[in-house]
Image: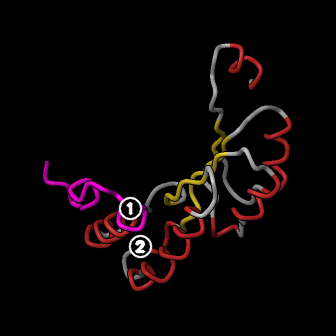
């Protein structure tokens, strides 16, 4: 697949995977893929270790989606801040919630989580970073 995609001019070849990805990353790198998402934290994935093994890889994820689940919003700040900082410190890593926010996230938690994520990522456009968006 990677060979065909490259022959068609594709530069970014991402794979969506669930679970622990230690061995998968090595296989993907060897076969010509260069991106993986998400890096599910609940499975114990270690983005910093993966960066050392595959320096050219692009990673999306690294933030446990359950931190914003209804009744768990007390976890947002304590888990979001270090996870985002860790991802931002790595070249080619983009922090996002693993598989998006869970369906059991309430509206207030969703807005709080997304606003905080944009703040931590340095969104220059305050309107872009604020949730809910009114436009």
Residue 11 point in image, percent of width and height:
64, 27
Is residue 128 in the magenta section?
yes
Residue under circle 1?
A: 122
Magenta stretch, main secondary structure class: loop
Is residue 43 in the magenta section?
no
Q: Which of marks 2 and 1 is nearer the N terminus?
A: 2
Q: Which of 110 and 118 is in front in this view?
A: 118
Disc 2 versus disc 1: nearer the observer:
1
Residue drawn at point x = 24 percent, y = 61 percent: 131
Residue under circle 2?
A: 68
Query: Circle 1: is it few (<14), some (14-19), or many (20+) Cα within 10 Å?
Result: few
Residue 80 point in image, percent of width and height:
48, 73
Magenta range is 118-135
Relative to 51, 72 lies left or right: left
Residue drawn at point x = 40 percent, y = 86 percent: 74
Instruction: Judge whether 104 appears above or below 35 on screen.
Output: below
Relative to 111, 6 lies left or right: right
Residue 102 point in image, percent of width and height:
44, 62
Q: What element carries label 1?
A: loop
Q: Nearer the viewer, residue 119 or 32?
A: 119
């Amino acid at each position: 697949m990677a060979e065909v995609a490259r022959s068609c001019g594709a530069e970014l070849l991402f794979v969506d995977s669930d679970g622990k990805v230690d061995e998968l990353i090595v296989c993907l790198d060897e076969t010509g893929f260069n991106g993986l998402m998400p890096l599910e934290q609940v499975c114990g994935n270690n983005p910093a270790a993966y960066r050392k093994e595959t320096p050219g890889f692009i990673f999306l994820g690294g933030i446990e989606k359950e931190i914003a689940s209804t009744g768990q919003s007390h976890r947002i700040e304590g888990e979001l801040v270090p996870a985002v900082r860790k991802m931002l410190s790595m070249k080619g890593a983009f922090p996002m919630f693993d598989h998006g926010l869970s369906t059991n996230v309430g509206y207030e938690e969703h807005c709080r989580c997304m606003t905080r994520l944009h703040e931590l990522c340095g969104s220059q456009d305050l309107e872009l970073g604020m949730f809910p968006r009114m436009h």
